[in-house]
Amino acid sequence: MKAVWKNAPVAVREVRTEIRPARILAYTTVMTIMDRLHQKGFLTRQLQGRTHMYSPAIAYGEVRDNAVKTLINSFFDGSETGLVEFLNGVSTPSVSSTTEFSEPSNMDETLL
């Protein structure tokens, strides 16, 4: 989505190059993902010649705002003040902060 927001309207080939410049992904993989994003309503597409050109159907700011709201609800019990205090380094004890994880090696580090 970042590649589409940055360069809209954009073709699959351009997105493919933008997201992995060092290691090119398969064209069909990127095309499939973009088609699914189109089917779900995140992208619009228009046929120009033999190429589909994609544009965002949802604004970056809207996605960002929803992500921040989800973060606040998930980690700060819906408190925007809690997020601001965390960002400012103010530590307030809570039920979720008392839970400690075991050794990090027990976790799938690719998800961190």
Image (cartoon, helix red, strand yellow):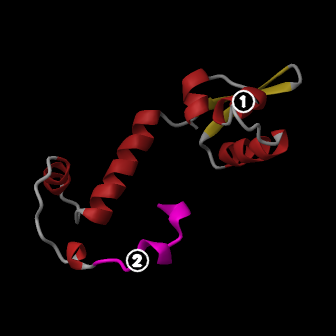
Magenta residue span: 100-112
Q: Is residue 106 magenta?
A: yes
Frontmost residue, 85 versus 61 = 85
Residue 100 versus residue 23 in the image, above or below: below
Residue 42 versus residue 108 in the image, above or below: above
Task: Please identify the residue farthest to the right as the structure is shown.
Answer: 50
Residue 38 versus residue 15 in the image, above or below: below
Frontmost residue, 95 versus 81 = 95
Say which quadrant the N terminus sits in. top right
Residue 75 versus residue 26 in the image, above or below: below
Please name the residue that numbered disc 1 is placed on.
Answer: 17
- What kind of residue is marked 2? Glu
Q: Which of the two labelled residues, at mark 2 and mark 1, occupies the earlier sequence position?
A: 1
Tell me if 43 is positioned left or right of 107 in this view. Answer: right
Frontmost residue, 20 versus 73 = 20
Name the residue located 73 percent from the left edge and 34 percent from the top edge: 16
- Which quadrant of the view contains residue 64? top left
| Mark seen at residue 76 | none
Q: Position of residue 90 (x, y in %)?
A: 10, 55
Task: Please identify the residue farthest to the top as the structure is shown.
Answer: 49
Please name the residue that numbered disc 2 is placed on.
Answer: 103
Nearest to the eye among marks 2 and 1: give it. 2
Q: Position of residue 100 (x, y in %)?
A: 29, 78
Name the residue located 20 percent from the left edge and 53 percent from the top edge: 83
Q: Secondary structure at mark 1?
A: helix
Q: Is residue 111 magenta?
A: yes
- What is the crowding at mark 1: few (fewer than 14 residues within 10 Å), some, or many (at least 20)? some
Name the residue located 73 percent from the left edge and 38 percent from the top edge: 23
Distance from the alpha carbon under mark 2 to that under mark 1: 38 Å
